[in-house]
Amino acid sequence: MKTRTPVLVAVLGASLAMLMVVGCVGTAIWYVRDDADETSGCRESVQAGEAKVRTDRWDPPEELPGLGDYPEIHWQVRAMGDPCTRAPGPTDWAYQGVVTLHPQDAQRLAQRYEFVAHLPQSPGPADAWPALVPLLPTQPRWLHSTAYDEASPSTRWRTAFLDVEHATLFFVLRDH
């Protein structure tokens, strides 16, 4: 009997180990499949969100100072990384938008922040996302202001371009 006990324990131990391995592999397969389904759903949701052109007022309004009670805004958001990954850390977001201003607010904004002619060779409205391009004025005269870009509060990196004649502001915001 004494020789059978170690063999029996070894057989039972091996069987238990085998069941644990099979269970772990099965769980891993289920987890990977479930994770792939979840990631696919997340990516579809992100793509739908990025395609959407929003028209709700910018919140918080302090991020786009001096615009007054603008009649219209269209904006989009894009992930700058992969928000669907399980890797730790936040995902940064980029925003672009087109704001229709009242003419007097466009003039006031240009004077207050000393907007000057924008050089077309540097990044600007020409880099607008496709869904926003039809909302930009034809034959614009874009102005840019470093003072506006750096105005407080600066919770996001801001770059803005103003066409006073068409009372239109194009903005880009990035998380930081």
Image (cartoon, rainbow, N blue to C red):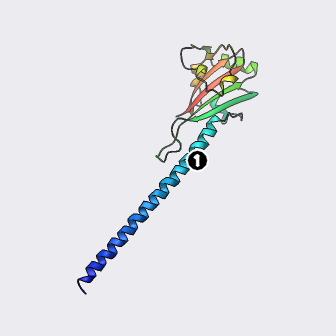
Q: Quadrant of residue 100?
A: top right
Q: Position of residue 161 (x, y in %)?
A: 62, 20
Residue 69 showing in the rendered view: no
- State the image quarter where residue 17 is shown: bottom left
Please tell me which residue lies in front, 5 or 143.
Answer: 5
Give, as a three-letter code, the residue at label 1.
Gly
Residue 20 drawn above or below residue 155: below
Measuring 68% from the left and 13% from the top, which residue is drawn there? Answer: 139
The residue closer to the viewer here, 29 or 154, is: 29
The x, y position of residue 40, in whole percent, is 55, 46
Task: Say if 82 sits above or below 31 in the image.
Answer: above
Rendered residue at 27%/78% (across/down) = 7
Q: Which residue is mark 1?
A: 41
The answer to whether 77 is drawn above or below residue 114 in the figure is below
Left or right: 9, with 125 as reference point: left
- The answer to whether 54 is drawn above or below residue 121 in the figure is below
